Image (cartoon, coloured by chain):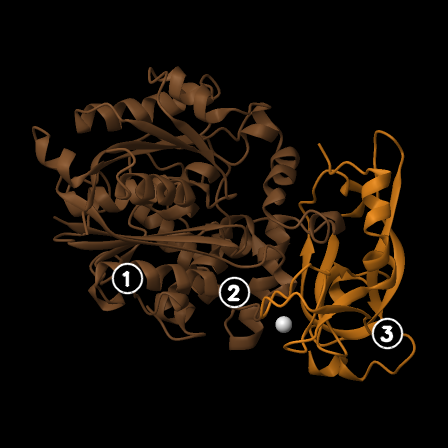
Chain colours: A brown, B orange
């Protein structure tokens, strides 16, 4: 099967960009990816969750495409809550792989800091079921808190052990130039931080931030014509869904759609979990990371938090997880996150990631999640 | 920017919300809530409406301090996944209980409560909440 190459990537610093709008951020990331690839994309996929609600802007495909100088090209907007980026990459990958177009720019963008936290919290909660979760005041953090308490009580994992994840994420983000949070924290800091939805504390949660990321995908044929042939390709992609409402799932301590998406991607790439050198996984909250580590087969069920506390998944270990600092510390501009992850894994394999580097990484995985486990995508990237 | 309450929307959902009506799958036998056009477990469209038991246990809970717009007067707002006596799960707020008294495994019963008010238009929406069970002894509490 013909390969789909990553010909260019671009990311912006995640943070409070008060002076810049949705289009400015998208353009910065897009221009970098296009200039790096040295080719203008034949189509654009925009990934975003909140613009309809916060910027009151729809028609995002045309809005962004024409705004970045690609007027006339086919352009789509793909939305899957915090999993929008991965869903958009899946779409772009399919467009190139099918031969419909020979290049696609996937650009994820999110502008979250223009409004007070309660407004953003309400908008983010739209990832959940409006009639039977949101209606009852179950915020998105609240739903993740239900899963976190269930996990901790079921497997007898204490607060401090769970805190190892955010501590590691802040450590990894320290030298990432575009990370939102670049300061060291301790387990005590997590335990003392504000309670958002007990048992989730502020330092278990990814910050609110603006950002954009872009990945330019090209066909094998186009890749071979470029002045510099891209060194990374997408070896496998997977996507799966589950019920949006938490209560209809079979278990509260599992994210089966993650396992399904990862298995598809691994099978397509012909690799096993033990072949993975580096992973960027979805950790909007501590509990997400813990459950995903287990679903991806990196730890046994109920043991991920303890494995972390024993030092697993840090730089130097295989796989190294979230060397960027993850959603927790690099930041989580929701609809752009999945694109950041694939850009980061591509940079690790190319050997030019500007932060914590996984030396000699040949194979990586990016796992993006929408809602609290309803839309999952997984991508295996490999060195060409 | 809270969820807007529309009379049509509230009216449409009244049966599952007020009467705790779920659906039972004729193929796999499992029950689910909220009611859906197909079984979330096996995909079957052969479903019948069932009234669910009004008692169960707290399977897990969270106490929300940073509440959404429309719930400002409710913080801290406890919500739970309740496993009803027939095994069906329902997500709803907990009521008539202090956050510090809530335990996993505690027995609860469904009651109808005012859930929210639309700030702009003054519309009120009702729905299910769970309170510590009154009709039976609270025997499970020590197991928390
Ligand atoms: Zn069924």
Seen at 10% across and 30% down, the residue is A226
Chain letter for mark 1, please.
Answer: A
Of badges 2 and 3, the one in the foreground is 3
Ligand 1 contact, mark 1 (Cβ < 8 Å): no
Above or below: residue A290 compared with residue A383? below
Q: Which residue is mark 3?
A: B133
Q: Could you tell me how far apart the alpha carbons at marks 3 and 1 are, in whole angstroms? A: 48 Å
Q: Could you tell me how far apart the alpha carbons at marks 2 and 3 are, in whole angstroms? A: 29 Å
Sequence-wise, the earlier of marks 1 and 2 is 2
Under circle 1, the secondary element is helix
- Mark 2 Cα shell of 10 Å, populated few (<14), some (14-19), many (≥20): some
Seen at 26% across and 44% down, the residue is A97
Q: Which residue is mark 1?
A: A266
Seen at 12% across and 48% down, the residue is A384
Ligand 1 contact, mark 2 (Cβ < 8 Å): no
**Residue B132 % position (x, y):** 84, 70
Most extreme residue toward the right, as rendered?
Answer: B135
Under circle 2, the secondary element is helix
Whereabouts is ligand 1, in terms of quadrant?
bottom right
Q: Which residue is mark 2?
A: A159
Q: Could you tell me how far apart the alpha carbons at marks 1 and 2 are, in whole angstroms? A: 33 Å
Q: Are marks 2 and 3 on the same chain?
A: no
**Residue A128 % position (x, y):** 62, 49
Above or below: residue B116 compared with residue A55? below
């Amino acid at each position: 099967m013909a390969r789909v190459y990553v010909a260019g990537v671009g990311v912006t610093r995640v943070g409070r960009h008060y002076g810049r709008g949705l289009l400015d951020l998208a353009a910065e990331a897009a221009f970098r990816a296009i200039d790096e690839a040295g080719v203008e994309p034949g189509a654009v996929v925009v990934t975003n969750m909140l613009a309809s609600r916060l910027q009151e802007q729809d028609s995002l495909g045309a809005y962004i495409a024409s705004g970045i100088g690609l007027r006339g090209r086919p352009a789509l907007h793909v939305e899957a809550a915090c999993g929008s980026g991965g869903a958009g990459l899946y779409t772009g990958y399919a467009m190139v792989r099918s031969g419909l177009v020979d290049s696609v720019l996937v650009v994820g963008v999110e502008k979250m800091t223009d409004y007070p936290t309660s407004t953003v919290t309400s908008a983010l909660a739209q990832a959940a079921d409006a009639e039977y979760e949101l209606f009852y005041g179950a915020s998105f953090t609240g739903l993740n808190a239900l899963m976190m308490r269930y996990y901790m009580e079921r497997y007898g994992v204490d607060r401090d052990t769970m805190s190892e994840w955010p501590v590691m994420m802040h450590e990894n983000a320290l030298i990432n130039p575009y990370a939102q949070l670049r300061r060291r924290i301790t387990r005590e800091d997590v335990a003392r931080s504000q309670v958002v939805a007990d048992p989730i504390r502020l330092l278990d949660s990814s910050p609110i931030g603006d950002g954009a990321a872009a990945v330019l995908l090209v066909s094998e044929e186009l890749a071979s014509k470029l002045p510099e042939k891209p060194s990374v390709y997408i070896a496998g992609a997977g996507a799966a869904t589950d019920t949006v409402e938490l209560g209809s799932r079979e278990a509260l301590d599992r994210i089966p759609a993650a396992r399904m998406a990862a298995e598809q991607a691994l099978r397509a790439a012909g690799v096993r979990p033990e072949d993975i050198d580096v992973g960027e996984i979805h950790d909007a909250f501590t509990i997400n990371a813990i459950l995903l580590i287990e679903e991806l087969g990196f730890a046994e069920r109920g043991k991920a938090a303890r494995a972390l506390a024993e030092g697993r998944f840090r730089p130097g270990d295989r796989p190294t997880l979230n060397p960027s600092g993850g959603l927790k510390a690099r930041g989580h501009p929701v609809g752009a996150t999945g694109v950041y992850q694939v850009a980061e894994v591509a940079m690790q394999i190319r050997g030019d990631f500007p932060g914590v580097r996984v030396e000699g990484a040949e194979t990586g995985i990016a796992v993006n999640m929408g809602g609290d486990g309803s839309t999952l995508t997984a991508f295996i990237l490999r060195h060409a | 920017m809270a969820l807007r309450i529309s009379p049509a929307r509230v009216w449409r959902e009244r049966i599952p919300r007020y009467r705790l009506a779920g659906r039972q799958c004729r193929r796999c036998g499992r029950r689910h809530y909220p009611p859906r056009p197909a079984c979330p477990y096996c995909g079957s469209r052969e479903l019948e409406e069932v009234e669910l038991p009004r008692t169960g246990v707290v399977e897990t809970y969270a106490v929300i301090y940073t509440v959404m717009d429309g719930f400002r007067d409710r913080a801290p707002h406890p919500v739970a996944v309740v496993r009803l006596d027939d095994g069906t799960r329902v997500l709803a707020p907990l009521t008539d209980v202090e956050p510090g008294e809530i335990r996993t495994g505690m027995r609860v019963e469904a009651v109808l409560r005012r859930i929210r008010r639309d700030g702009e238009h003054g519309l009120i929406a009702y729905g299910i909440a769970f309170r510590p069970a009154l009709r039976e002894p609270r025997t499970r509490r020590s197991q928390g």
